[in-house]
Image (cartoon, rainbow, N blue to C red):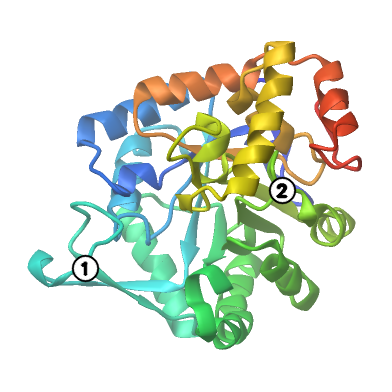
Amino acid sequence: MKPDQKVKFGRVDIEVTAFGFGTAPIGNIFREINEQTAGAMIERAWDAGVRYFDTAPMYGHGLSELRTGQGLRWKNREEFLLSTKVGRILQPARRQDIDFAPWTNAAPFTMHFDYSYDATMRSFEDSLQRLALESVDICFIHDIDVFTRGKEQPEAFKQAMDGSWRALEKLRSEGVVKAIGVGCNEWEVCHSALKQRDFDCFLLAGRYTLLEQDALYAFLPLCEERGAAVVVGGGFNSGILATGAVAGAKYNYGPAPQEVMEKVKKIEAVCSDYEVPLPAAALQFVVAHPAIPTFMAGTRTVQQLEQNLDWFSHSIPSEFWLELKSKRLLREEAPTPS
């Protein structure tokens, strides 16, 4: 599959490119990226035919939206799709009074969770202002998962299913946005949301990958049944499927546990036998599922972006996937690239 290949976005009458551009890194997560690099990556993605871009108020306390809007400002608005998120309100503050972690040199705003109807509407309007673009195509309710909210998750989920849902459904019914959904780190939360409300799509970070396919048995089948599209982010499980099982490899934003290291080593052995780069297999596996039209990849440099684009197009023999399944390193039911 080529990065610029257009794929229908579930039941919604829009198409996304199979390769999407994720903008968390240009919000300066963990370390700073300068303006020139941020702009150059957006431009390179555009030149490669990428036409789906995802951002969020959380990324760099608004910095990602500012940079994404700048990078896309003079592009033909009919040629690309843009998604952002609701659930956090940003308020201006002095830099010295803000705890930016894990962001570095971010925009001068504090962040506060709020999934009420009014806050959702305000969040959406604020995003349009930061982007300085006339429209957003897809809007996700952000981070109503246990990973982010901990003990507060049940209440956050309930508030989102009442307040944010009503706001986004109104925006969708008025044609202000084309698709609405939930973006979080746990497929179980997405599954619960889809059972309760009529969502078009989900952004799932790290929970359907070459390492993990538990979403195959409940969530993804329901998405297929309802025509809900799933955007997968974090397809490298926050690092290890890009770096391999090296010392210090990251999994779920922390050090990879031993059992994960061992499984990745076994996958790498099959990759070596078939001369397939591990990251290429990780990228291409995800979009083989019929409910997943696009993979959202974030990069820190133009060189990383170039590498991801190459991996996404790398030729992989069908025997490679059969070998992974025969060694029980991949679920038998998992769709694989043809």
Residue 309's x, y, as percent?
54, 21
Give the image quarter of residue 310. Answer: top right
Residue at position x 41%, y 32% from top? 75
Residue at position x 78%, y 34% from top? 288
Three-letter code for the amino acid on which mark 1 is drawn? Asp
Give the image quarter of residue 81. Answer: top right
Q: Is residue 132 visible?
A: no
Residue 32's x, y, as percent?
23, 42
Q: Name the mark on residue 212.
A: 2
Residue 326's x, y, as percent?
90, 30
Residue at position x 29%, y 61% from top? 61
Residue at position x 79%, y 37% from top? 329
SS at mark 2 in the image: loop
Q: Name the mark on residue 99.
A: 1
Give the crowd class for mark 2: few <14, some 14-19, many >=20 residues within 10 Å. Answer: some
Which image quarter is the N terminus in?
Answer: top right
Front position in the image: 148 or 244: 244
Three-letter code for the amino acid on which mark 2 is drawn? Glu
Front position in the image: 249 or 315: 249
Residue 275 vs 33, above or below: the answer is above
Residue 261 vs 165, above or below: the answer is above
Give the crowd class for mark 1: few <14, some 14-19, many >=20 residues within 10 Å. Answer: few
267 horizontally vs 184: left or right: right
SS at mark 1 in the image: loop
Residue 102 vs 280, above or below: the answer is below
